Image (spheres, grey):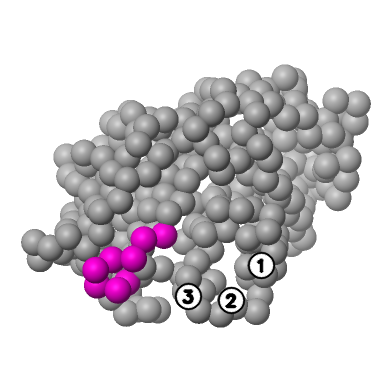
Amino acid sequence: MKKLTIICISFLLLLNVSCRKVDEAPAQTINAFGFTTLEEAEKNLGNYAKAFYVVDGSIFTRLENFSANNSSIGIVDAWFKDIFNKDRTNGGTYYLGDVEYYYDEVKQAYMARGFENDTDMSLMSTRVKEMYGKQVKAMLIRDGKEIFNTSYYVPSDFSMAISNPILPSTSFYQVSKDKGLILKWRKDEKNKEGVIIYVHWSDDKLDLPPNERYIQIATKIEDTGEVTLPHSFFSKIPKNAIFSVNIIRGNIEIVEGTDKKQYKVYNQVEEKLSCVIE
């Protein structure tokens, strides 16, 4: 089997893509999980479309789960831009839960206090997991003044179970014509935003080298705890294709600070699967 590179665009990258200010007219063309306008994204993704708004600052956590090898990575980040389209800079001190995020002038980036030496992200992964399934407080303090203070619900982890077999000697789940892709997870009764299913194929195949073609499929479903994606859902993807399936659950809130700037506060848990279609 050829060694292929799987390109999996995570939701984190897209959350940092700018398309418009919340109160401005939308850009003509965007790429929101394959939707090319903000109106399309809002119609199909609901609250998750806020990921594509331009804001002046943000704080977030992301928990990535990899079912094939039963591993997780917890990621946190914060940023601020005083002037749109300029470099990120010091916007004050963010707080998410009981973790403080301060701006390091040397590294020119926000750091989580007490986690500076957590190079393998193991400590932060544990802390991030503790936030899920709870009401979490987010705040920004600048020059001793409160810029914003909000509390919002962070949906719980998935505890995903995949019925599909794994292709021998790989970490690829097999998607067959008769069964499709069968997913079960622990539903979150408090989650009102649903779950995003995002499929991305970058032209990788078991029998051919990758080219430059891309296919993206996204849909929002209710958080029922299970879904069967039929083979027809993947009809645009050819036989033997290696593709990514991301199952995303989270919450995104846009808040306006006392400085009249807009901030994005969000948390997400993302189950990342690598699949091959028969």
**Identity, as a three-letter code, of the amino acid under mark 3:** Asp
Q: Look at the image and tell me whether residue 201 can be seen.
A: yes
Using the numbered discs, state the Cα–Cα distance from disc 3 to disc 2 in whole angstroms: 9 Å
Where residue 253 sits, quadrant-wise, is bottom left
Residue 64, image x and y in percent?
49, 37
Q: Image check: 261 left or right of 11?
A: left
> Are the two marked residues, 2 and 1, in contact with CB atoms closer than 8 angstroms?
yes
Q: Are marks 3 and 2 in contact (CB under 8 Å)?
A: no
Asked whether 242 falls inside the magenta stretch, the response is no
Which residue is under mark 1?
Answer: 39
Kindly state the secondary structure of the residue where label 1 is placed: helix
Q: CA distance from mark 2 to mark 1?
A: 8 Å
Q: Examine the rendering and report whether any part of residue 272 can be seen.
A: no
* Marking on residue 26: 2
Q: Which residue is mark 3?
A: 23
Left or right, 227 with respect to 107, comes to right
Q: Residue at x 50, y 66 (%)?
A: 53
Q: Is residue 259 magenta?
A: yes
Residue at image coords 76%, 55%: 215
- Of labels 2 and 1, earlier in sequence is 2
